[in-house]
Image (spheres, rainbow, N blue to C red):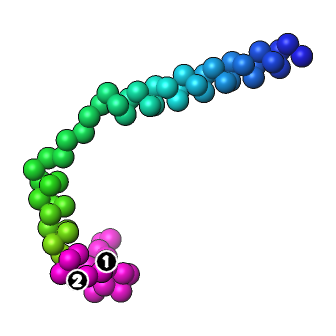
Amino acid sequence: MTIVLTGIVAFVVVSLVGWAIAELKGKTCGYEASQEEQQSLQNWTEALNKREREMDIHDVMETISTKGFSAV
């Protein structure tokens, strides 16, 4: 019984430590978007506002090449 209880307590302690590390990592490591990312986001929002909706699968099929590449 004590082995099982010790295992459960150890599991809870390890999981709480992992959770605390994950929470603190998000608060200590900041992320700043680069100039390219900001420009890309601005272009995307302008295109979305122009279309007034997001692209569905049919729009994507019309705008990209779906032929693939020859392996030979």
Residue 14 lies in quadrant: top right
Residue 59 is inside the magenta segment: yes
Which quadrant of the figure has residue 64?
bottom left
36 or 16: nearer the eye?
Answer: 16
**Residue under the image location 38 percent in, 81 percent down:** 57
**Residue 8, placed above or below residue 54:** above
Let me know if residue 18 appears in the view.
yes
Q: Name the residue that disc number 2 marks.
A: 51
Does the residue at mark 2 contact the one at mark 1 (Cβ under 8 Å)? yes
Name which residue type carries label 2. Answer: Arg
In the picture, the disc for residue 36 is none
Residue projecting furthest to the top: 2
Which type of secondary structure does the marked residue at label 1 adopt?
loop
Q: Is residue 70 above or below residue 20?
A: below
Name the residue beneath numbered marker 1: 54
Instruction: Using the rendered view, name the quadrant where residue 55 is placed.
Output: bottom left
Q: Residue at x 30, y 31 (%)?
A: 29
Q: Is residue 24 left or right of residue 13?
A: left
| Label 2 element class | helix
Q: Nearer the viewer, residue 24 or 40?
A: 24
- Extent of the magenta region: 48-72
State the quadrant of the N terminus.
Answer: top right
Give the CA separation, mark 2 to mark 1: 7 Å
| Residue 67 visible in the snapshot | no
Pick the residue in front: 64 or 48. 48
Residue 26 x/y as whole percent: 37, 34
* Residue 32 relative to residue 54: left or right: left
Is 6 covered by the magenta stretch? no
The structure residue drawn at horizontal position 67% and vertical position 24%, both measured from the top left corner, is 12
Amino acid bearing label 1: Glu
Instruction: Please state the total of marks drawn on the protein image.
Output: 2
Residue in view at x 19 percent, y 61 percent: 41
